[in-house]
Image (spheres, rainbow, N blue to C red):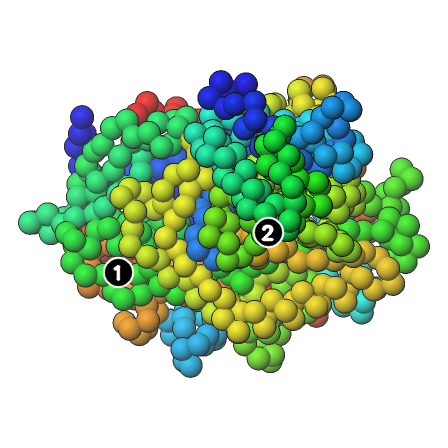
Amino acid sequence: MDTTLTTDQVLTLEAFADTIIPGEKRGPEDRAIAGAATGGGAVASGAIELMLSPEGGLADTLDDLADGLNEHARDYAARVGLTPEPAVTPFVALAFADRIALARELLSPGHPEQELWVALAMFSAMAWDTGAHMHTTEALAAGHPGLTAMGFMPPDPDGAWRFPRFSYGRPLAAIHPRTTPRGDPE
Amino acid sequence: MTAFRQTDVVVVGSGFGGAIPAYHLAAGGASVTVLERGPWLAADEFEHDFKFGSSSTRVFEFTMGEGMNVLGGNCVGGGSVVYFAAMPRAPRFVFERQGSLGRRMWPTAVTRETLDPWYDRVAQALPITCSSWDDVTYSGGVFAAACDHAGRTANPVAAAIDTDLCTNCNWMMSGCKFDAKRSLLLNYLPAAVGHGARILPLHEVQRIERTTGGDFRVHYTVVDPVDYRVQVAAGVIEAKVVVVAAGAAATPVILQRSEEQLGAMPAAVGRYFSGNGERLNTAVLNEDRVREVLGLDRGDGLAYAANQIGRGPSAASWDRLDGSLPEFSRYSLEQLYFPPGFGTILAQAPDAVGPTWFGPDKKEILRRWQSWLTIFIMSEDDNEGVFGPPPLTGNADRISMQMLSRGNLRYEPTANTRHGWALADADIRDILERDGLARVMPWTNDVIGAYTVHPLASCRMGDDPATSALNDMNELREHPGIFVTDGSAVPGALTVNPAFTIAALAERAVPGIVRAARARGVDVRYLGSLPPAARAGRPVVVPSV
């Protein structure tokens, strides 16, 4: 884990990632993951690792993004009349429905910071559906939550994918009448 | 350190627009240097891997703009390395399009009839084969069957793929490790190198200037092979002719940055950008209904559940490619595969009670990912894109080590474009939601705006100097000796995949480039030859930079 992020910042980013692709709690005391869905979500799939990956280009901004999320959460809580909970950061303190409501605001067209939050949301989603912080073969072998839930089929023993059966193998529609003999539109 | 070289012809970019002139000019006797900003990868370097830093991120570029995002190749071979190899010719009516000009936007000299001989040459060189139903994947098959059930037609899509070599792995966007996809790495480029052309990867052209003698100096930087944000060297190369083919998201930017030395650019440089009217819809199929309504069965107990299997588009609906219909209402619908990550983020959950593209409902449709069917719309947009002032270097500011950058393209779809999209969206819904086959939603534009994998027309050819940057032979107006031969030269959206048309136009431009080179004292002839079609592999050693 990158030491430039505080524990609170990590928990905040986890809570945001869990809002994008929710998952089940790691334990009864887990506050960052709201437990709004069954199976592993973005966090269990490696969202923080992907955000921190040097290749991604996001790592240097994560502390600001975490702090920004908490600022917006503090503002949101005040607007809707929630009582601040000092034990955890303002974003983590939000119930899942409120996290969703705030995320919708931040990710909507017209929000001045939309681009920042879209980037963070994309990394959260990509952690779940690609596991891009690790090799795909290794992710599948390790039971990566997202790829497994999507039913992503495994490779051949050499790590490459091949599907010898791929076609229904029969005509399934009439060809467009203005198709040339070469198979092009006229 | 600044290197300095001399050559007869500099070609900027090694995709279809660059590789084809590079081959012919080298074959005809010119010394040719190709400057390519991306890396040069061989088949065994194309990986089946989503990990950041694998070939998936090394070979293409996602350039975010304001309202438009461009996904394109960034490697030797350009778009041909990351494309899906669907190669239909543009229908006849496309060349008669007027767009919002109120008059024909293509040069008078270019029609389907006059372009067909050039299409034929490309088809022979790659080669491109006419597909049969045996080549249509499960995804294409289920789309075709749904079209048929809705009283429509559907066609297998002609492709530049050697199906004997193809494993239907669906990793085409990372480059083809089996050399089944007929990229330019297998034909024009090795043939060009065989005739002495030099290809310099990781060389990003920044600007062009003119010498006092009337030649050109092309300034480039050399980028780090892992972190493209890092520039490790710079250099200049002098040439008598320059062919700019950096892709429609980069060619106009290079020319804009060159204005200070070259003089004013035609007004159409960096204007009239088209995203080929592209848009995606995601259908989540009901497996039971696919079996019951369409009678489909894979033979292993499954009706479909094959989103992962295949090789990009294999079937398309051409019912709306009808020249008698009004402009902005014509489009093709093509089955497509996009890998997870790019292919999932903007998909919307059809029956979401909360947010549609993230949250619990999105996760639920992701669990059914193998039953997804992606439908690609290629329609007639309105050439709305405009490039702002160029960034300091390159065509965009790099955000990550590879793959991601922010550019200066602005695109706000007009009512004409939105009209075409709405018609196509409704058409897809009519075909795929019929009798409960699927639930369909278009990708959301609310998140990052529109997106295209086929950027076009940012430096277009035409007859009218006020609305075209190039004459009908691809020469840059007011700047003789500079030619543009990539997708930026195509005047507008094509309603089909454009690679074949870009390649045919590049073939057509070559005799004129040869004439210009000869007039500048280059000992070169137009031979009209083609690369050996059967040639495979890369007998070319990647040079050190």
Front-most of B375 and B148? B375
Count of residue discs? 2
What's under tag 1, amino acid-wise? Leu
Q: Position of residue B67 (x, y in %)?
A: 47, 57
Instruction: Check the image and report above or below for A100 versus A33.
Output: below
Looking at the rendered structure, the secondary structure element under dot 2 is helix
Front-most of B455 and A185? B455
Q: Position of residue A89 (x, y in %)?
A: 59, 32
Q: Quadrant of residue B333?
A: bottom right
What's under tag 2, amino acid-wise? Arg
Is B540 left or right of A11, judged from the image as shown? Answer: left
Q: Quadrant of residue A118?
A: top right
Q: Chain of mark 1?
A: B
Q: What label sits on residue A79 in the rendered view? A: 2
Q: Position of residue A72 (x, y in %)?
A: 54, 44
Instruction: Check the image and report above or below for A27 versus B250.
Output: above
Q: Which residue is mark 1?
A: B476
Q: Quadrant of residue B204?
A: top left
